[in-house]
Every structure is written in structure tokens, then in C-alpha cells.
Image (cartoon, rainbow, N blue to C red):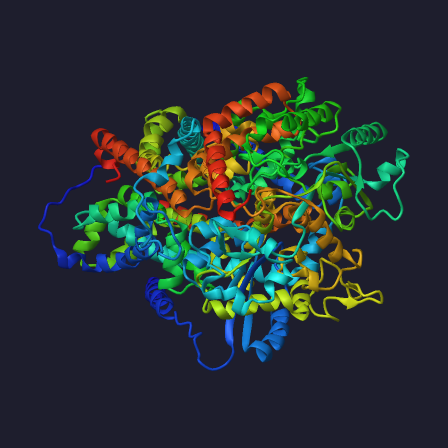
Amino acid sequence: MYKNDRIFNYIGHVLMLIVTVMTLLPFILLISSSFTDNDAILRYGYGFIPSVFSTFAFEWLFITNGEIILRAYGISFLLTILGVILSIVITTPLAYGMAKQGLPLRKIIIMYVFLTMIFNGGLVPTYLNYTQVFGLKDTFWALLIPNLLTNGFFVLLMKSYFATSIPNEILEAASIDGASETRIMLQVAVPMAKPIIATIAIFVAINYWNDWLNGFVYLARRTDLASIQVLLNRIMQNVQVLQQNAAAIGGEAAVGLAQTPIVAVRMAMAVMGVLPIVLVYPFVQKNFVKGITLGGVKG
Amino acid sequence: MKKKIMVLFTVVWVSVFAIFSLSACGNDDGGTADDGPDELVMAFMTWVLPSDTQMIQDAMNEILIPRYNMSVELLIMDAASYQQNIRLMLTAGEQVDIMNTIMAGYTHLQGQGFLLDLEANNLIQNFGAGIPDAVGGWEILNGARIAGTLYGVPTNCDHAVGRGAIAVGTQFLDAIGFDVPSPNNDIIHISVAELDSILMQINEAFPEMETFRPTMPGGITQFMSIDPLGAEPFGVLLDPVNDLTVSNLFTSQAFYDFISMMYRWNNHGFISLDAAADDTPVTALVSAGRLMSYMTGGKPGIVAQESGLCAQPMTIFQTGPDMMNANAAARFPWAIPFTTANPERAMTLLNAFYTCPELSNLLIWGIEGVHYEMQTDGRVDFPAGLDAGTSGWHNGMAWNMPNQFISHVWMGDDLDLYDQLIEFNANAQISRAFGFIFDPAPVQNEIAAVTNAYEELIVSLGMGMVNPTTGIAQLNERLTAAGLYRIIDEKQSQLDAWVIAVGMN
Amino acid sequence: MTRVKVKKKTNWRRFIPVYLMMLPGLAYFFINNYMPLPGIMVAFRRFNAQLGIHGSPWVGFANFEFLFATQDAWIITRNTILYNTAFIIVNTVLAILVAALLSELSGKLKNVYQSAILLPNLISTVIIGYLVFAFLSAESGFINNTVLPFLGISPISWYTEPSYWPFILILVNAWRGVGYGCIIYLATLTGFDRSYYESAMLDGAGRGKQFLHITLPLLKPTIIMLTLLSIGRIFYADFGLFFQVPMNQGALFSTTNVIDTYVFRGLVQLGNISMSAAAGLYQSVVGFILVLFANVVVRKIDPDSALI
């Protein structure tokens, strides 16, 4: 039995290593091309090893545009951290309530949350709502608020965890002991739900980090509030829009395309978009893993 | 520990409420003060957002406030956001007083009620009196009318396009012994057969390089001597100068010949296998040393423009005539949207940008001594140490600004560039349908379907990757099924009505 | 897993703190999702900016016609549904397998795996498009220049041959999405009591048996819920995946054109707010009907896992 376990462990690690390498392969390509001379990319294509080594793209980003990039990083980090905290604080009690046995109107509330995943008013009405009713245009809140829950997905995910992984008996027992509902949630349910809270925190962080649409739509005047992904996507979208409209604009589209940053710079920016997460994630994960195992023991 | 969590939880939870209520009441734009100059908003796009917008705006207001008792806010967006954001902002009723209609689409903005009639209460006559002369007279201005009503003012730029133009790196021409005239400032007019032979020779001399890359599908309307009567060639005038019959381009002999030529060139190995999937700008490929020639559009200043983009001397060949399409003056005019604070003040501002050289120079080239320096011959150039990448205001948008003809000429262009452009527009062949603007509203379903079918087949056909006979037959079959002929019929009936309305014989 | 159903009188007072806790979330959904919702009605109007979204004239179902008045209607609907079905199956199976494997493994490398499989979520589809192009480019691509010659296969023109793209897109989607599903399942697994496994091992159940008889049943509610939610969005396609990754190649439309790309291409020139709203509403309504249907089926088989 013991030996069997070791063999399983070996095979498992080999399998996971293969998966990991396959996952990382494109990233090597990404990093390599960001360190390749742009003309060489255009002439010889992308390669796993730079055909002509160049740090031009990073010099362009850090020396020519260093201030903008740094500020964008600041916005991205602030946004992600604030967003994760607020999202979790809103999501957890809502999901807890939705999982509560015997709660009156529970089914209606679940339906209410579920429908947000299916129907949405669309970009124009959402924009009108946030700019005309709430005045979020050209504010930092415009980056934060529309993404807090986006739709019911994370709430339903957490509700499902509460409902299936936390035995109702434990909650009932706490209730009989005279603990208030807030207490039960914070001191009994939340510690047991650490794995799913950690997971959703990671997803929310990814959402905030990746978001660029809100920056596009709500920050027409305050472009200084652009996050790193807004900067990156500006470049990408410009290329695409120019090609899409080449027939309508005519020869001038070529002039515009020539002004957009070169391929190596785009790749370098993509690296910059991933890099901080790669650096920060192991620390975050270490703490999460601790949380997850703790939660596991208690359950 | 648990207490702390509880306190933290409560604090954050309460602040969520606070944020919502704060943001809900922080919504007062008190922009309607009675005293002080009127505040106007001017929206347009640039390729890349400039960094010195505030500086330019302040300099403009130093002129505008004393002269007109108004100030302007430059609301600049880049190409990607302009298309979407300007529609959103106008839908939300946000104040925009004058705007350029590029990307958002002049006819589509008008069709959805975004634009004001510029002649209501004689608006342009009373407050924009300088505009008709500035754009070259009412005959040009009338070209921007939609169903008889004027919603926009064209920019001063090249309204015609030199058809059948191709840019070739001069170094490759030198290598095959082609006699490039010196100085090489003008377009060289040659026949298609001569062009064919030139490309054949550079292809043989530099077999390891990519010889030619067509721009698809935009290149079709740029290259062929037809009038697409709108952006996409769904129902075209095949002989725009003489004949007002709307035809299917794709069944025409001219289209067959064009596609056959691409097919022949592709079979000779001119065109890269990656040409369709690779989105790198052709000029970047030339400057990287991978590509030798590509499609372009003829106009005065094109040699300098393409040489600059390719970072090497380029030679421009043209095989067709200079021709002005029906919608030439309606491609990206300036307009007054319905969210303007005051149409009269907006028109006054627009008039100022069309007639005041100081404002035009600020808008196009920036501030003298900061963004440009006057040279001894009267042209302007970067101050020492600056270039297009480091200047805070060098947008490459002169053609999209109201009136570049009253601004300085940039280094590298001919001193009389603007006269050349005026002459170019005046001498070009003009489509008999000039001034006709197609309203797509009645056939939107067909346009959506035809666009999808067209995009599915046109690129591989135009890149010469498919046999012309079978490929064109397939294209026609798909487009016909998608409703191309309903678009053609609609265009024809609108065109016929237009002919009667303008009283043409 | 038996649930004790305590029957008692509804005690509203007792639940007041619960409602209060839920209030911010419910209020948020009201603001973010329900307040803009009436705007959906613009799908039945001919939008005019000066009349506004709620003042434009009614046109009935005219804005929906373009979705059906085309011979592509069948292809885009088929592609959308088949791809999403394939994505649900492939990603779910792979995510469960990887999660089950990860939960059994020990050692420090485990953290590396977990980080690595999440990384693809952090790059935009445009960049993924470039990376795929780097692999598949006809002239300079890694596959055509290195892999295929090594295997003795002649180069393939990937961007003109639609038949390969279902596999490419499913692969790219799995590459990007498996990590996401995996950590949901992993969280669910770590939340469970290890004692189930320990007693199973004492009974002599092998790894395979444990997976089938313990892991899968434990994951079942999560699997069902995630699948139900995916069914609700089965008429929506990931625009970036189908537009950017195949580099918008016309030659590939027969296997890459989906509802979202069709609508984008058809409307990008027209810029018609009403028609794009109509497309979105159509996708939502069909998804809603399908998910309600699926939920009824689930409720018949396993009432505890049903969504509603």
C-alpha cells in the first residue's frame, strides 16, 4: 500500500509537470519575443530563443514611458486589492444567507441573483445608469464598482459551497447555543468556507487585474487613471479598429497603424501585465494554502 | 482576533453603503454659470493619446476668450475608444459641441438622430460664414448633404484618390536598373503591364524577400477605378464619370481582371502565405526589410509620407486615374451633435477653426518653440531633440482637422503641398453621383448578412489564393443569397430619387 | 450528507440579521444589473438619440430579423452551441482530473502547478492570438518549421483550412480555462473530510475506486451547478476566442463564425444600438429557456443539486 502510494505520487508529478510545461510554453514564447529585436520578429517570426536580442521594448516602456507605466501599476494594484476586499465582504454574507435553510423568500432571492447571470441591460443602459444616476464618469469608482460582483456567478458558487460543505447541524448547534446570526457566520461558517473564499478572491483579483473595458468607457477625460491593462488594450484595440475601418478611412489608416507601438512592445506590455501576478501570487497562495488546510481540518 | 475580524467586517460593510450614497449625490456639474466665457467641448480622435493636450487647450483659450468670449475643452480619444465612447457620451446627453464623425460614422450618427441640421435658422450662414469658402465652395460643402440636409462640414484634405497605386522601395528599383527620376517627389504614372514587369523583376532580383502585399479588403475600393457609393462596395458605379447605373462589382470584368492579376502575382510567389493572417502594417514590414512593395492611394505628398513610414526612400507608381467618389466630402466631416450647449456658439467655434490660422496651427502642429520650430524656408520641423515619439503633440491628424490648408507645411513636404492638394481635388475625375449619400437603414439586415459573407471570401480571393473563376462564382453565389441585389436595388432607387432631387439631367 | 430538515414555524424575527447581511449584495445587484435592465427594451425600438432609449418608436421584432434572415443563421447557431458544449465537457473533465490529482499529490511542486495553470487567465485574447500565430504561421511558425518536419509531415496552411480549427479552439480554450475550473473543484475537495478516504482505504478501495465512489459524488453538486450556469450562457460565445485567435480569417468562418462574431461583423459599420441589443436579448432568452429546462431535469433526478 505504502509503495503503491509512492509510485502514484511519482506518476502524478510527471503528469502535472507535463501539464505545467505545456501551460508555460506559450509564456516562454511571449517573454522571448519581448526581448527580440522588432525587425527580427517581422523578418524571421517569433522564436523560443530571441533571434536578435534587444531590450528596446522594455527601454521604451520604462525609460520613455516609465511614469505612465508606474502609475498604471499603482492603479492596477490599488484597484485589485480594494476590489477583492469589497467583493468578498459583500459576497460572503449574501451567499451565506442564500444557503440558510428555512430562510423565508430564499428561492426568490436565489432567482433574483441567478437572473443577473442571464440577462443584462447591455453597455448603453449600464453606462447611462452609472454616469447619469450615480455620476461615476471619470472617477476611480467607475473602475471599482461595476466589477464588484459583475453578476451572480461567484455568489452562487459560494452559496453552493455553504450548502453542501458545511453541515447544517453545526450551524444549528451554534444557534441553539445562543450565538447571533452574524456570529455564526463569522465564527463558524466563514472559517469553514476558507477554501472557497480564497478561490473566489483569486478569481475576483484576476477579473480586476484583467479589466480594461470600464477604463475605456468611463475614463474619457481622466486617462491618468488608466490601469496597466487599459494601456495594453488601448494599443491592441487601436490596431484592430484601424484594420476594421480601413475601407472607410482610406489611406490614412496606414498612417495610424504605423503610429501604434511595434510588436515587441506589445509583447513586452503583455509580459508586464502578467509579471506582477507571477511575483505576488506565490506569497498570496502560501497564505491561502494555510487557510485552506486549516479549513479542511476543522471540517 | 475574531473581534478584530468582526470590526473590520463592519467597517468595510458600512463603507460600501457610504460609497454608493456618496457617488449618488456627487453628481453636480454646475457648468452653467452666467458669467465668464461659454465653455464648449470639441471631440475628435487621435491614433495615440497626446500628452500635451492641456497646454494646447490653454493656448487656444488665450485666443478664443478675448475674441469670442468662449473657451474650448479638447476631448480627445484614441481610435479604439472613439468609435464606442462618442456614441455612449452622446446617448447619455453629455455636452459635446463640435465633433469629428470619423469611426462613429457620419451617416450612422445622422441616421440615429445624433446630429443637428447646420442650416436650421441659417446657422451656417449666420455663424459659420467663413466655412463654405474655406472648404472650397458650396459645391464641396453640398457633398456632405444627407437627403438634402447638411449635417457636417468636410475637412480640407485629399477628397480624391489616385487609383491603382503601389509603393515600391526605391533601393529595389535601383537594383534592377529602373531609372528613378531625381528628385523623386512625384507619382510615376505607368501602365499595368509596366507595373507587372517591374514587380516581376524585383521578385527575381530578391527572391528571399516578400515582393508585394495587397491590403484586403480595403484595397479593392482604393485600387479599382470604381465608386463604391459608401464604404463597402455593395452596389457600385463601374464607370462613375459617365454612368449612374448601380452594378454588382463582383460580376464585372474589371473585378475579374483585378483578381486574376492578384492570382497571377500570388502564383509567381509575390505574396506571402501569411499575408492574410498577419496584421503587421505593411510599412513596418518594409522598414524591417521583409517586404518590397504594397498597395497605397495616390495623392500629393504621398512619396514623402510613405518614405517616412518605411524609413527609406519609396517610389509611388500609379496605374489609374485620380478619382473622387460620391461620398468624398462625407467620409469624416465635422458636425454639431444634438448635445451641444448652444448651436450658435458651436458654429462660431467651428468657423474659427476653419478660418483662423493660429488656431489651426495650434490644433495641427502645436505650439511654436515647444512642438515645432519655424525653418528658414517657411516650413516647420521638430525642435532639436524631439521626434514623433517624444513630442507631446504630433498627432498625424492634419487631414482630419477642419482646415490644414491654413496651417504650416511640415518639413519633408513640398512648400506648396496645400496648393497641390487643392489642384489635385479640382483636376480629379469626379463621380457623377458626387453628393449622393446612401442611407443603409432600409437594408440593414442584408448589409449584416452580406458583410459576413463578403469578409468570409474576399480576403483569400483578393490575396490571389483562390482560382478567380471558381472563387468569384462562389462569392457571387453567397452574396446573392445574402441579399446583395436587394442592396443594389435600394441603392439604385435612392440614387434615382437623388438625381431628380438635385435636378441633374 | 443527509440533511436534517427541521420543521418549525417561520420565525421572521430570527432572520432579520440575515436579511441585513444580504442587503448590500442584493442592493448591488439592483444597481448594477436591474436598474439598466429596462434598457433591454431598445431591442424592440428603432433607436433615435434625440428621443432616447425609452422614447424611440416601437418596431416590434424588426431588429431581430438580421439574426435569422441569412443562410449563415444555421452555421453560427450550430457553431456556438457545439463549441460551448465541447468546452463544457472538455474543460469540466480535465479540470476534475487535474483537481483530483492535485489534491492527492504531496510536495512543494504542488504550488508551482497551481500557479502555472492559472497563468493563462492573465493574458488577453489578442496576445493569445499572436502566440497561436507564432505556432501556426505558414512561413515562420513553430509547428510548420520544427514539429512537422521532425515528424516527416509536410507544412499545413493552418489559417486557410477550417477543419483544424475546432481542435485548435478547444485546445486553446482548455489551455486558458482548465485552471479556473480546477481550483473551484480543488477548493471543494479540500473542504471535505479526509475521513471518507481513510475509511475507504481501510476497506481496500484503490485510487480508481476512490475517485469514482468518493471524489465524484462529493463534487457532483458543484459540477451540476457549474454546468447549469454554463448552459445559461450557451448562446453566448467568447468573442475574443473566436475573433482574435483565428486572426479574423474569412477562410475559417465555416468553423469559427459564432453568433457574437457574426453580430460584430454585421453591425460594426452600422453601429445600430437596437440591433445589437436584439442580438443580446435573443441569446439571453434562449439561454434562460435552456437552463430552466435543464434545471427541471436535474430536479427530477437529484433535487438537492437543482439550482432553484
Of all residues, the one furthest to the top in this rendering is C152
| Residue C194 picture location, percent across and down | 35, 38
Q: Is residue B183 left or right of residue C161?
A: right
Q: In this view, does A123 lie to the left or right of B46?
A: left
Q: In this view, does A54 lie to the left or right of A224?
A: right
**Residue in the foreground of this view, choosing between B93 and C57:** C57
C5 to B238, vertically: above or below: below
* Quarter containing the C terminus of chain B: top right
- In this view of the protein, can residue B383 be seen by the observer? yes
Q: In this view, does C254 lie to the left or right of B171?
A: left
**Residue in the foreground of this view, choosing between B358 and A176:** B358
Quadrant of the rendered structure where residue C15 is?
Answer: bottom left
Of all residues, the one furthest to the front in this rendering is B505
C160 to A143, vertically: above or below: above
| Residue B464 picture location, percent across and down | 66, 26
Question: How many numbered dots are placed on residues in this image?
Answer: 0
- In this view of the protein, can residue B438 be seen by the observer? no
| Residue A174 picture location, percent across and down | 21, 54
* Quarter containing the N terminus of chain B: bottom left
B416 to C87, vertically: above or below: below
Identify the residue at image location x=59%, y=23%. Answer: B472
Of all residues, the one furthest to the bottom in this rendering is B35
Quadrant of the rendered structure where residue A157 is?
Answer: top left
| Residue A218 picture location, percent across and down | 47, 59
